[in-house]
């Protein structure tokens, strides 16, 4: 039992030293490569979604079905090809318009 406790303490101490606090709290990754994660097809550069910046501004339930965050998104992402893909139509653009993000529907805002 003592060995398990020491191992858990060491694991936590290592994780605390190498990971940001929000990651330990279960708030997801710092960034997400949406093209790779969702196998989006298209010519544009991948969107490297700054997850940590978004979670500073909106509640997890704005994007995720689980109010605690993580897991499935509130919309189904099915169409993954071209400029009328579901990220554009159902998810990102609608939120950018609602939140009044400057140039929120401009390609270069997200595709860098």
Image: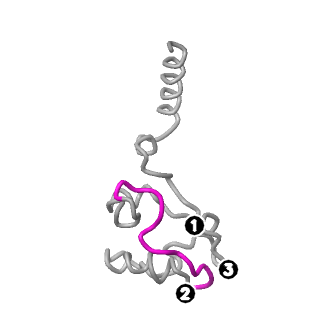
Quarter of image, res 61: bottom left
Mark 3 vs 2, N-terminal side: 3
Residue extending farthest top: 2
Q: Are marks 2 and 1 in contact (CB under 8 Å)?
A: no
Mark 2 vs 1, N-terminal side: 1
What residue is at 47 percent from the left and 52 percent from the top?
28
What residue is at 56 percent from the left and 73 percent from the top?
111
Mark 3, residues whose alpha carbon is within 10 Å: few (<14), some, or many (≥20)? few
- Tell me the magenta residue range: 67-83
Quarter of image, res 42: bottom right
Residue 91 located left or right of residue 42: left
Q: Nearer the viewer, residue 63 or 1?
A: 1
Q: Nearer the viewer, residue 3 or 55?
A: 3
Numbered disc in front, either 3 or 2? 2
Query: Badge 1 is on which residue?
Result: 34
What residue is at 51 percent from the left and 72 percent from the top?
110
What residue is at 35 percent from the left and 66 percent from the top?
62
Q: Quadrant of the C terminus?
A: bottom right
Query: Badge 3 is on which residue?
Result: 43
Q: Which SS class for mark 2?
A: loop
Is 50 drawn above or below residue 15 in the view shown? below
């Amino acid at each position: 039992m003592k060995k398990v406790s020491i191992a858990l303490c060491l694991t936590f101490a290592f994780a605390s030293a190498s990971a940001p606090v929000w990651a330990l709290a279960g708030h997801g990754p710092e960034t997400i490569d949406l093209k790779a994660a969702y196998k989006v097809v298209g010519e544009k550069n991948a969107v490297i979604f700054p997850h940590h910046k978004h979670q500073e501004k909106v509640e997890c339930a704005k994007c995720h079905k689980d109010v605690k965050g993580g897991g499935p998104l509130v919309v189904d992402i099915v169409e993954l090809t071209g400029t009328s893909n579901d990220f554009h139509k159902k998810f990102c653009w609608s939120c950018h318009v609602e939140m009044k993000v400057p140039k929120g529907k401009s390609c270069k805002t997200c595709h860098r």
